[in-house]
Image: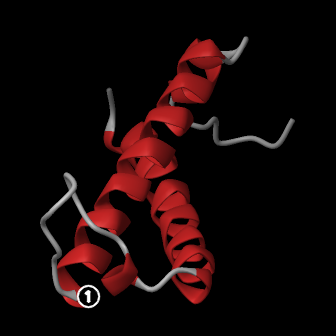
Amino acid sequence: MTIRSLMWILWPSFLVAGVLSAIVFALVDPLDIVVLGHMQVDRLTFYTVAFFLFWLAASVACTLSLYMSSGSPAILAEPADGLD
């Protein structure tokens, strides 16, 4: 896996995680959520953990999309100098 393919996976998934976090936490107050039936965490911890979980989920989706794309060897190759 090249640096370029990591960029194609991590950057879009980061943007999606940011948007998803903004949408979810505009509608849900983290203090209303109880983890494992009895444990309540502070807002900052919950925001952080949720953002990284959203980022992980979006990264898995981007990785699978890149892996299953029909032209994946061509996509992962370095770009040619000429315009086609």
On the rendered structure, is 58 left or right of 47? Answer: right
The residue singled out by tag 1 in the image is 43
Element carrying mark 1: helix
Type of amino acid under label 1: Arg
> Residue 2 in the image: x percent, y percent?
33, 33
> Does residue 15 lie above or below 2 as drawn?
below
> Residue 18 in the image: x percent, y percent?
50, 74
In this rendered view, identify the residue nearer to me: 17 or 82.
17
> Does residue 3 lie above or below 49 as drawn?
above
Kindly give the residue lying farthest to the front in the view shown: 38
* Quadrant holding the N terminus: top left
> Residue 49 in the image: x percent, y percent?
24, 66
> Residue 15 in the image: x percent, y percent?
54, 69
On the rendered structure, is 12 left or right of 80? Answer: left
Quarter assignment of residue 79: top right
Residue at point 54%, 18% (across, down) = 67
In this rendered view, identify the residue nearer to me: 61 or 69.
61
On the rendered structure, is 83 left or right of 16? Answer: right
On the rendered structure, is 12 left or right of 83? Answer: left
Residue at point 23%, 60% (across, down) = 35
